[in-house]
Amino acid sequence: MYSKIKKVSANIRRIRESLNYSQDYVAMKAHISQNSYSKIELGYSKISLERFFLIADALGVDYSLLLEPND
């Protein structure tokens, strides 16, 4: 289970960086604090389903992209 959470976190970070968005920007768009967002990206905090959807919307990507393996 832990590795799946890490994969989602890594996908969020990879997509954010590919869009050249800052953590502050995505956190603001997702209506969460930058500190909370950072912890999600680093895998220090489990992501709730609600925040998962908010982050995907803030990144402008389909939810499935965040779930794909990042091999």
Image (spheres, rainbow, N blue to C red):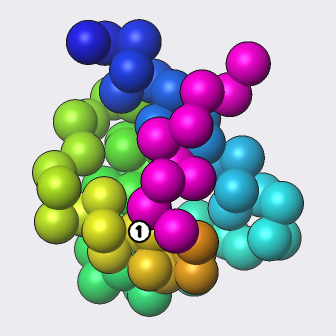
The answer to whether residue 70 is seen in the rendering is yes
Q: Amino acid at mark 1?
A: Ile
Task: Tell me if residue 1 comes above or below residue 54 in the rendering.
Answer: above
Viewer-proximal residue, 57 or 13? 57
Residue linked to disc 1: 55
Disc 1 on helix, strand or loop? Answer: helix
Residue 13: image location, x then y, percent: 63, 48
Task: Tell me if residue 30 comes above or below residue 51 in the rendering.
Answer: below
The answer to whether residue 26 is seen in the rendering is no
Name the quadrant of the N terminus: top left
Viewer-proximal residue, 10 or 35? 10
| Left or right: where 26 falls relative to 70 | left
Residue pictured at 16% horizontal, 66% vertical: 50
Residue 16: image location, x then y, percent: 68, 61
Residue pictured at 83% horizontal, 60% vertical: 18
Residue pictured at 24% horizontal, 63% vertical: 51
Viewer-proximal residue, 23 or 3? 3
Q: Is residue 20 one of those drawn in magenta?
A: no
Q: Quadrant of residue 25?
A: bottom right
Residue 65: image location, x then y, percent: 57, 53
> Badge 1, how many Cα within 10 Å: few under 14, some, many 20+?
many
Task: Tell me if residue 36 comes above or below residue 31 in the rendering.
Answer: above
Residue 32: image location, x then y, percent: 28, 74
Q: Quadrant of residue 71?
A: top right
Q: Which residues are magenta?
A: 62-71
| Left or right: where 55 falls relative to 66 | left
